[in-house]
Image (cartoon, helix red, strand yellow):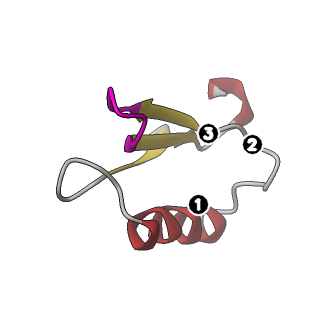
């Protein structure tokens, strides 16, 4: 069973639409809005990947 939801940019860096889809999936999974998100950034500061734990224990 997965312990987190992860999303990456289709073309290396994420777009606003891809980030919005990630947030929608997290909300559907019942993850509360105050949960912290991990992000991997490119050298230029753009988001490459985001991940959120499904349970607070994995946060």
Q: Residue at x 65, y 67 (%)?
A: 27
Badge 1 marks a residue whose secondary structure is helix
Q: Nearer the viewer, residue 33 or 16?
A: 16
Q: Residue furthest front?
A: 44
47 sits to left or right of 58: left
Number of the label disc, if any, that sits on residue 37: 3
Stretch of the chain drawn in magenta: 41-48
How many neighbours does mark 3 have within 10 angstroms: few (below 14), some (14-19), or many (20 or more)? few
Q: Residue at x 70, y 26 (%)?
A: 57
Residue 14, given in percent of the width and then of the height, sits at 35, 55
Q: Nearer the viewer, residue 12 or 53?
A: 12
Residue 42, given in percent of the width and then of the height, sits at 33, 32
Q: Residue at x 67, y 28 (%)?
A: 59
Number of the label disc, if any, that sits on residue 26: 1
Cα distance in 3D space between marks 2 and 3: 7 Å
Q: Is residue 9 above or below residue 43?
A: below
Observer able to see residue 1:
no
How many neighbours does mark 1 have within 10 angstroms: few (below 14), some (14-19), or many (20 or more)? many
How many neighbours does mark 2 have within 10 angstroms: few (below 14), some (14-19), or many (20 or more)? few
* Circles 2 and 3: CB atoms closer than 8 Å: yes
Q: Residue at x 57, y 64 (%)?
A: 23
* Circles 1 and 2: CB atoms closer than 8 Å: yes
Observer able to see residue 39:
yes
Residue 26, given in percent of the width and then of the height, sits at 58, 60
Cα distance in 3D space between marks 3 and 1: 10 Å
Badge 2 marks a residue whose secondary structure is loop
Nearer the observer, disc 3 or disc 1? 3
């Amino acid at each position: 069973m997965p312990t987190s939801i992860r999303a990456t940019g289709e073309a290396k860096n994420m777009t606003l639409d891809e980030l919005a889809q990630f947030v929608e999936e997290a909300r559907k999974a019942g993850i509360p809005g105050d949960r912290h998100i991990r992000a991997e950034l490119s050298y230029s500061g753009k988001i490459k990947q985001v991940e959120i734990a499904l349970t607070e224990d994995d946060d």
